[in-house]
Amino acid sequence: MKWYNSIKIKLLGFFLFISIIFLITLIITFFYMRENQFKENAMKETSLATSKILNYLQTEQANAELLVSILSSMTSQSLEHAINDENFIPSLLSTHLRTDLNLQSAGIWFEPYSVEKSKKDFLLFYNKNTDNTFKKVNQYIKKSTMNYRDMTFYTAGENLKKGEVFWTNVYIDPVTKIRMITVDSPIYRGNTFIGLASLDIAIKEHTKKLWSNLSLKEMYLIFIDREGTFIGKSSSINRFTTDNNIYHMKSSEMGALIKTIEPSLKKHKHKTDHDNNIKKEIYTIDNDPVLGGTSIVATYYFPHTQWNIIIGILEDKVMIQQNETFKNVILIVIFLTLLATLLGYLILQHIFVKPIESINEQLKDNINQDGLHHKLLTCNDNGEIGSLVENLNTRTQALKAAKTSEAKEIEKRIQNEKLLVQQSKMAAMGEMMDAVAHQWKQPLNALSMYSEIIKNDFDDGNVDKAYITQFSIDIQTQIDHMVNTLDEFRTFFRPNKENQEFTLPDVLHSVLLLTKDDLLKNRITVNIEQEDALTINGSENEFKHLILNIINNAKDAFNEKSIEKRELKIRIIQDNEGNRLEIEDNAGGIPKEIIKDIFKANVTSKEEGKGTGIGLYMSTQIATKHHATLSVKNQNNGACFIVKFNA
Ligand SMILES: Nc1ncnc2c1ncn2[C@@H]1O[C@H](COP(=O)(O)OP(=O)(O)O)[C@@H](O)[C@H]1O
Ligand SMILES: [Mg+2]
């Protein structure tokens, strides 16, 4: 048996195949889940990661709006105070210090002649000192080349309703040259717009705080106003931009990013949205130019300020935990699968392979002991294997029984054979006795005659010495004849144990001598047509039986058919066609119906008491012993028996 034909190997292969299929399915499922479920999770994670920034911005925005509203409403309520009390506004402003607001300066700006009838322009401007207190700047207006009412913050403020707030774009303060954003709230006297309050937030300070809320590794942040001008950007984005507007970034390099986020930015641009909720959109970008890999980008739009924040995070960073989990799950599953495979293999090996191996061993042992499989097999299995063993055992028992009965049969046959031999011998003896009786009848008659004659001759006086001499010779001749016959008869039935060489003519003549008178009485002439000196090795006496059987059968046939001219032709031939003995009669031949069966035992056409059907059967056995075959054919109006010797 080749190793790969073993059930063990097949089982192992089967289990490995199943596990591999299982693992492949699992891995595909996991990758599919990663692509879908995990990505969704990653986006949620991104939102969470940026929530701090959003909180900070929203709080700051709310604080600024609250402060500017207080400033405008207090000014409108207590205009006198505001103008004349040096500490009124600074004390209001100092409340911002309790918040995170990065206030740089603040101002109250009035409509022409609305405060002082003599003065067209009137304003109050406060700047933050290094000790975080605010101080009125008297010279502010002189430093400016532009009228404040022509500036964007003021023109936008004019259109605001009471209590409303407006955030400007990023601009560079003409006096301080600092990048700023201003937040306005209008001041009304009754229903008349008389000016506005403004707070200036310094961007540099402002964004500094932003970055502190963010770990900027593998991440970037872009913070723009409604025009797309950068309020702030993380340093990782710097190498892609020389300009201050996001739409003018080196777009060939930033193409993928801008292309993805631009539609959502444009959607909000210049849109007056009174819904105060932050709008959020999240995308994945396959080849993020800033991070150099797949990134998750979230854009947030603040309706009030109309700012946008764009945050990009490397997907792998967000998914690091999930990747780790994913890896662990796969490792655990591989381990469990292998364990299950091994266990499954061991269990099946125990319940399946082991019984088979044990049966195989038992069978081998059986053969070793006696070359047969007569021992019964044992097996503990209750399933198919057990039933297989049971059936094998049943079969073994059946074979055993068959073998025993076969042996009995053979024994019986041998016994029958012996009986047949005995019977045939008895039959032959009977026939021989017949022949001897005939053989003796004539000399006995002659002796009886001689005893009659001698008495008469003596009375007549004819008995003299010469007469007695002749008489003695005649009697001796008759007695010799009888003794000869007796001797032949004795040797005929004496079994000669050892094989010897003998010539066929000798055997033939010996048989003819015994049967001479019997043949004569039955008017059968024997004609020896050819008599080659054929030598055979075997039992002479047995061969005499064979010839005697054939001659006796012919005699029976002649008598049965009452044939007139009875002739036996005998030939002993040694030629090219082979060595053979032929005995041919003219008694009409063997009836067709029985010709193919006559060599079988107990086949006879003769009536009960006359025939036994054994003669030809025994003759066949004798022929076989002498390496010859006995056959018959009907020819010349008779049967011709041929004993043919093998070359
Ligand atoms: N020479 C023969 N001519 C015709 N029939 C023969 C001859 N020899 C044998 N048979 C037939 O073959 C039969 C079988 O012969 P055999 O075996 O010697 O048994 P049995 O002589 O006791 O019948 C005979 O009964 C006879 O019918
Ligand atoms: Mg016979």
Image (cartoon, rainbow, N blue to C red):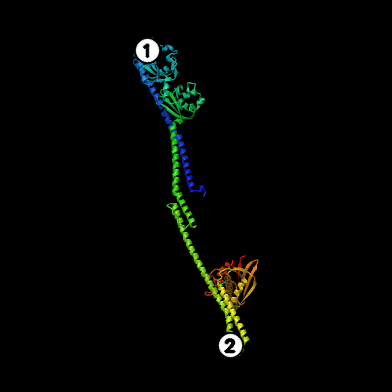
Which callout, 1 or 2, points to the residue nearer the camera? 2
Residue in front for this viewpoint, 77 or 364: 364
Other residues around mark 2 within 10 Å, as few (<14) / some (14–19) / many (≥20) = few
Say which mark, if any, is on residue 507.
none
In this view, 455 is above or below 605 = below
- Residue 106: x and y, percent? 39, 16
Three-letter code, disc 2: Lys
- State whether residue 54 is above or below residue 452: above
In the rendered structure, find residue 455 and report the number of the disc placed on it: 2
Splitting the image into 4 quarters, where does residue 274 fall?
top left
User: Can see residue 637?
Assistant: no
The x and y percentages for residue 515 are 59, 76
Give how far apart the Cα atoms at labels 1 and 2 are. 215 Å
Looking at the image, which residue sits at the far front?
465
41 in relation to 110, above or below: below
The image quadrant of residue 517 is bottom right
| Tally of numbered tags | 2
- Ligand 2 lies in quarter: bottom right
Q: Is residue 564 above or below residue 383?
A: below
Q: Is residue 404 visible?
A: yes
Residue 433 spot, x, y in % from top left: 55, 76
Is the residue indicated by label 1 positioned so its CB lies within 8 Å of ligand 1?
Answer: no
- Tell me which amino acid carries mark 1: Val
- Which residue is more in the foreground, 615 or 373? 373
Q: Quadrant of the C terminus?
A: bottom right
Q: Residues within 10 Å of mark 1 (few under 14, many from 20)?
A: some
Residue 208's image quarter?
A: top left
Q: Element at badge 1?
A: loop
Q: Residue shown at 52%/72% (left/top)?
A: 423
Residue 531 coordinates in the image, percent (x, y)? 64, 71
Q: Which badge, 1 or 2, comes first in the chain's sequence?
A: 1
Q: Which residue is mark 1?
A: 115
